[in-house]
Amino acid sequence: MAERDLVGAREHLETANALANREPQKLAARQLGVVLDHLIEFWNGLHQAAGSLQSGQELPVKDTFVNVVQASPERLVIRSAGRNMRYRVDQLPGGLVLAVAESWFARTATSKLLVGTFLCFDAEGHEEIGRKLLDDAAQAGLDVTPFVAELDARGSGVDVDKTRVHPGGRRTPAATLPSRPADQAGRTRVEGDQAARRKAEEAAMRLAEEVVRKKFAEAFRAATTPIAQSELAEKLMAEAAGSGKKSDETIVMLREAQRLAVESGTVDLAMQAIDSLAAMRVADPLAAKTNAMEGLLETARGAGGQRQVAQAALHLIGQAATERRLPEATRLAEVAVASARKSNNANLMRQAVGVKHRLDTMRKK
C-alpha cells in the first residue's frame, strides 16, 4: 500500500486471508482489508479529480501555486518554476496528491477518512496530519478502529498475536513498539531506495511516452474525430500485442489506446485495453473499468452507444459485488442509470434502477 501497488496489495491480502487460521490473524486481515478498500476508493476519487481539472487552473502546493497545463484521469502536466512537469496520476508527489484531492473531495467526514487513509499509509503521506483527519472522522461518528489498529501495529506481520493484539484482545499501544535506532536507519534506507526507484520508473515511463508519441506522431495529430481515435486505439493495441512482451512502451501504448477508446466512446476497445493492462499486472481492472465507464457515459454516441455503456456497467456491478467492492459498484450503478436513461430503453432503465436501489439498501445497513 505504501508503494501504491494496490493490485499487489489485494493479492497479498487474499493470500493472508487464505492462510489465517487463528482469530487474531483473521482480525488483522479484516482490518487491512478495510484500510485497503478505503485507499482504493481514495485513488479512484483522485483519478476523477485529475480528470476534472481545467487547463490554467491553479493548485496550491505547500507555500506556492502550480498551474495545470493538461489533465486527464491518468496523467497531469503541471507548470512550476517556469517548466512543465509530467506525472502519471498514480505517481504524483504527496503535495500534488493533496492539492488535487482538495480540488475534488468535499469537506465531509467520509472525505476526511479517505484523505487521512492516504496520509497514514502512503510512503508520501504524513501520519501526524492523517491521524488528525481520522480523529475528525471519528468525532463525526465514523468507525476508524481498523485504521488506528493498523497504525499502532506498524504493519508488523512477524507474529500477529504479539504485535497486533494483547492476549486479552486489546490493541497494542504504539508506545509499546519502540523504534530502535537501527530500525529507524533501516527504514530510512528503504524509504530512500523506494523514492529513488519511483523516480527512475517515472523517468523511464516519460521516455517511453516520448518514444510512442514520436513513433505515432502523424496518427496522433490526425486523431481528431471519434472514428480516427478509435482506429488509432486499435492500431496501438495491435502494436502492443505484436511486441509479445511487457515493456514501458507497451504499457504506454495500451494506456493511450484506453484513453482514445474512452474519448471516442468505444466501450469494447476500452475494456480490452484495460484487460491487457491488467494481464501485465499494471492496472486494477475493476477500478480502471469503473473510471473508464464514467468517461464513456459522457462520450458514447447515440442511444446505441449509451445502451452498450449501461449493459457493460451492469455486468461490472456483478463483478464488483463478487469482490465485495461496494464503492465501485455504487459508482457503476450511477453510470448504469444515467446511460440507460440516455438510451431511452425502458427495460434497461428498470433494470439499472433496480440494481441501484438494492445497492443503496446495502449501503444503509
Image (tube, rainbow, N blue to C red):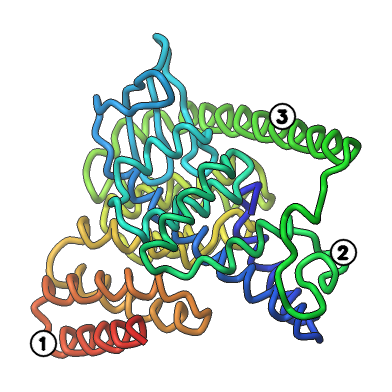
The count of marks equals 3
* Residue at the spot 69% in from the left edge and 58% down from the top edge: 152
Marked residue nearer the N-terminal end (3 or 1): 3
Nearer the observer, 96 or 235: 96
Label 3, residues with CA under 10 Å away: few <14, some 14-19, many ≥20: few
| Marking on residue 346 | 1
- What is the CA distance from the residue labelled 2 to the residue labelled 3? 27 Å
- Kindly identify the residue that appears in the image at 82 percent across and 70 percent down: 160
Q: Is residue 120 above or below residue 303?
A: above
Residue 35: percent from the left, percent from the top?
A: 57, 64
Residue that numbered label 3 is attached to: 196
Packing grade of label 2 (10 A; few <14, some 14-19, many >=20) is few
Amino acid identity at mark 1:
Ala
Nearest the camera: 107 or 194?
107
Judging by the rendered image, the residue that carries numbered circle 2 is 158
Q: Residue 133: image x %, image y %?
A: 45, 51
Q: Quadrant of residue 137?
A: bottom left
Q: Residue at x 19, y 71 (%)?
A: 339
Q: Point out the residue furthest to the right here.
A: 182
